Image (tube, grey):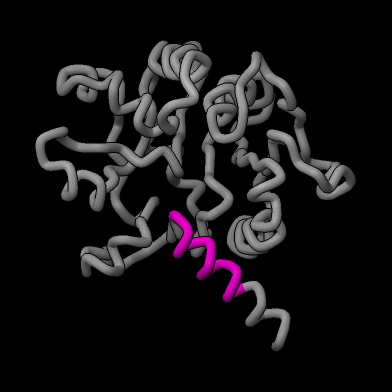
Amino acid sequence: MKKRVFITGCDRNTEWQLPWFIENFRKHMPDEELMVFDFGMETQGQFADIRKSLRGDEGMQGWFMKTSALVRASSFAENICWLDTDCEIRDDITDIFDRVEDHKLALAIDRPWTTRRPDSGDWYNSGVVAYKNTKGIPNVLLDWRDRCRDTNLVGDQEVLHSMLSPLAKMVYVTTLPNEYNVLRLQIQDSTCPKKIRVMHWTGKKGNDHISYIIESEKGE
């Protein structure tokens, strides 16, 4: 079993981001293991050497399959880190595993969502998720996966938030520094940390920005 692996996943709607994502990943972590989970991609031959299929996995679709991919990756490595394909890797983040604790998920606080939902407590962003399975897969991850099987009404991040009472957050979550997952809206809110190691271009405006970067690089 490998010591660690980084994983991501996409379907036909987001696979256009994959070459850009992998280029940034390889630029900063050229020797790290990366797996891409297929949530229903159209380009069959793309990155075949690192693709793992989750098509039709237990009836789940799209991003709900993220939690299943996180569990499945425990078969390949002791330490696992999920990264959304709209995350721009700007630095070597292998030290993220130094912050992971047994039986817990490591996530950064979603500062924009927390600010905009003051009555709901801290929200954690699910674009970057790390855990270790040396003492077994965290129960909170298994529960998260099972609950995502049962709904298509809200996103996986909302499902996770609904599971985490203030006490559960203390028991099941390790809070990562903001620099490991800086949200696009933090630029608008002027709350970005000085050091950004992962820039997460969320939403339609984030997709538009990634498209702009990709087209700009083609023209160079």
Is residue 182 or residue 28 the one in the foreground?
Answer: 182
Residue 30 visible in this rendered orientation of the protein: no
Is residue 40 or residue 111 the one in the foreground?
Answer: 40
- Image coordinates of residue 208 in percent, x first then y, are 53, 67
Please tell me whether residue 217 is drawn above or below residue 173 in the rendered image: below
* Magenta stretch secondary structure, dominant: helix
**The N terminus: image quadrant:** top right
Q: Residue at x 29, y 28 (%)?
A: 161
- Compared across the picture, whether 193 is left or right of 9 comes to left
The outermost residue toward the left is 119
Please tell me whether residue 154 is drawn above or below residue 89 in the rendered image: above
Q: Residue at x 45, y 55 (%)?
A: 203
Chain part drawn in magenta = 203-213
Is residue 203 or residue 10 the one in the foreground?
Answer: 203
Q: Residue at x 36, y 37 (%)?
A: 107
The outermost residue toward the bottom is 220
- Please identify the quarter of the rendering in which residue 169 is found: top left
Residue 219 visible in this rendered orientation of the protein: yes
- Image coordinates of residue 82 in percent, x first then y, are 53, 38
Please tell me whether residue 220 is drawn above or below residue 193 in the rendered image: below
